[in-house]
Image (cartoon, rainbow, N blue to C red):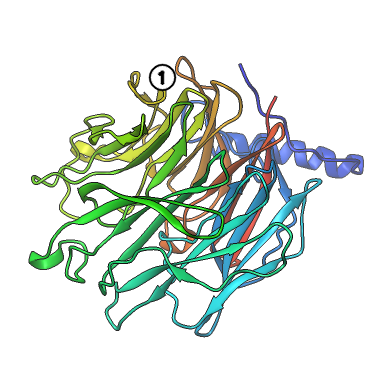
Amino acid sequence: MYKLHPINLGILPLLVLLFFLVSCTTEKKENKLSGNILLCGFGVGLSLIDSPTSANTEEPFLCSGQDGNVYLSWIEKQASLATLKYAKLIEGKWSAPTTIAEGNRWFVNWADHPVLAVNKTGVMMAHYLEMSDTGTYTYDIKIVIKKAASNQWSEPFTLHDDGVKAEHGFVSMSPLENGNFFLTWLDGRNTSGAHHDHHGGGAMTIRGAILNSEGRKLEEWALDQRVCDCCQTTNGVTADGLIAVYRDRSDEEVRDMSYVMYANNKWSEPKILFADNWKINGCPVNGPSVSTSGTEVVVGWFSAAENEPKVQVIFSQNNGESFGTPIRLDQGKAIGRVKTTFINSDMAFVSWMEGNQIVGAMVNQNEISERYVLANSSVQRSSGFPQLAKWNDQVVLAWTDPELNQIKTGFINIK
């Protein structure tokens, strides 16, 4: 069984050390949610990393680059100006922030955050959202690229070519072995610019595309013609091809997780990941998270069918051809915001939120480790979605501290 290291205290005066141990024991008793969920300081096994972000920052995203590095991106806001920045993790510390792009017509949203991907040659691809018209949800996906040998980001271009003034967002990116990038996104070209119930317009769709490192679109597909309106998409690369996971939407307003796979030069039909049978008339804004490791696939997600909030994970050992039995992770106070990352060929680390606490656990298809509270956050939308990324033998956690209005980061030490 994997365990989490305690916080590295370093060399402290004996009095401070004793005080910490006493307070830690007290906090474990006072903050125990249920079972083995414990809180000790900033979290059992969580060592803080000095954040590269300043005040007025939000929408963190962690990227495990194909080049072996971890990158953190975020948005800084000053009045109407939004700036997308990133930093690279070097020897356990964040580099100085670098600006990717900025603008004063951006759509900045707590759930629809920019993402970043890095291929094995160091080419970086990122996106942000820019208003295309006066409607609240009329915005486009803008893509920018930076070559490994360059310090300059490209001029932005629009990912989708429908030309419709509608909602486009919730992007996911995965680098491919050949240097290209696989992208998925929610596309509102059929909704007549409406949002959520669409007021008689068409349904939200999910689309996918392959872009090369120059930004040229090589292929594009409609993956599902009716999906939930504003839950994050997620995608990954398997030993056989590609997988995309998203919240679907039936004619009866059942919004469970579905997935599609690309293998042998064709896409599968959408499949239900697991029938929670969550019937809900509005989008819960709570998407899934997929991670892949060779033929292994893990998906974590949130559901509240029958008014019972749950966080579950499910594993596949055959590239997503079939999945096992779901494993419930939460202990009764889940609000979702799930993230997954493989730490080896079959063991994943999963984080989620129980009330205002970020909780994590090691899990494989057979067992769950103790569940640990990693950090305090908030149920408010301003706290956003905590992020995970694998780095060497550790997992990096990033989250927004709503009281400080700043992004925090830390190592989750794994043994």
The answer to whether residue 222 is seen in the rendering is: yes
Q: Position of residue 304 (x, y in %)?
A: 26, 40
The answer to whether residue 82 is seen in the rendering is: no
Q: Position of residue 105 (x, y in %)?
A: 44, 81
Question: Could you tell me which secondary element the residue under label 1 belongs to?
Answer: loop
- Residue 154 location, quadrant: bottom right
Quadrant showing the N terminus:
top right
Name the residue carrying label 1.
318
Question: Is residue 61 or residue 415 the one in the foreground?
Answer: 61
Tag 1: Cα neighbours inside 10 Å, few (<14), some, or many (≥20)? some
Image-based side of 58 in relation to 313, left or right: right
Q: Residue at x 41, y 36 (%)?
A: 242
Image-based side of 74 in relation to 261, left or right: right
Q: Residue at x 68, y 43 (%)?
A: 67
Amino acid at dot 1: Asn
Image-based side of 409 in relation to 214, left or right: right
Q: Residue at x 57, y 22 (%)?
A: 345
